[in-house]
Amino acid sequence: MRIVEPSFEIMHMAEPEEVLRLLELAGRVCYKSEDRVAPGTAAPFIGRIVRSGHESVIEHASATVRFVCDRGVTHELVRHRLASYSQESTRYANYAKDRFGREITVIRPWFWAEDDTRYALWTQAMQAAEDAYLALTDAGATPQEARSVLPNSLKTEIVMTANLREWRHVFRLRCDTPAHPQIRQVMLPLLAEFSRRLPVLFGDLAERFPPSL
């Protein structure tokens, strides 16, 4: 059994200047002010758009992110329906095979220290799940049959593409303190990176939700 930390990778996001230029060109159609486009006008214009709540304009740009997280987190992610997803399949990924090291990989629950009794109990449960999975596959069960014993903590990879308005919505929900601590663990640093690249679009949310848990 392997225990790993969650992570993310921004697979695609256009250069900031390109994003802002596209959004300005789209947004100015609403006001028929295309003649006002000039060097340096995009960021102030988009800033006013965001502050006014006219967020439909920012749907014209998108970003794609690859998450490494547990399956409990992905169950929450896929509830955001204005997005596209591609996820590692437990029907076809056979963790009993050598290419997976004949072991399962799980995400460490950061909220328990490794010397905590609860962490020890979790580790025992993960080992029991791995033992049961391997025993089932050795007995002839297919991966899609054996997966019934796999835990929510199982490591999975999911690619998510959404427009920037939807990303703002995701961050508002998943960075807030009522959100599950493990989804906040990946969303807070992701928001900080979005804000670093596109402060005019995500800086207000980064100030509201600082990256520390």
Image: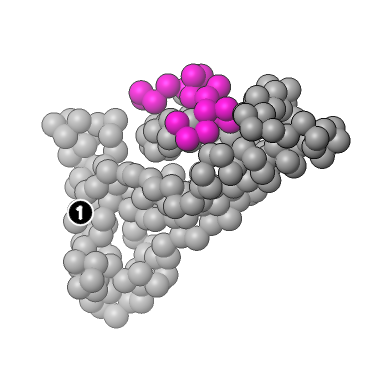
Q: Which residue ends up furthest to the top in the rendered image? A: 207
Rendered residue at 53%/47% (across/down): 14
Dominant secondary structure of the magenta stretch? helix
Residue 73, position as x, y percentages in the image: 44, 44
* In the image, residue 117 lies in the stretch drawn in magenta: no
Q: Which quarter of the rendering shows the C terminus?
A: top left
Q: Nearer the viewer, residue 92 or 128?
A: 92
Please give left or right for residue 72 compared with residue 112 in the image.
Answer: right
Magenta stretch bounds: 196-213
Secondary-structure class at tag 1: strand
Rendered residue at 35%/69% (across/down): 93
**Figure check: 204 above or below 201:** above
Q: Is residue 14 visible?
A: yes
- Amino acid beneath label 1: Arg
Please give left or right for residue 42 compared with residue 205 in the image.
Answer: right
Query: Which residue, given by chain and number where applicable, does mark 1 sit on?
Result: 2
Please give left or right for residue 112 compared with residue 22 in the image.
Answer: left
Q: Which quarter of the rendering shows the N terminus?
A: bottom left
Residue 4, position as x, y percentages in the image: 24, 47
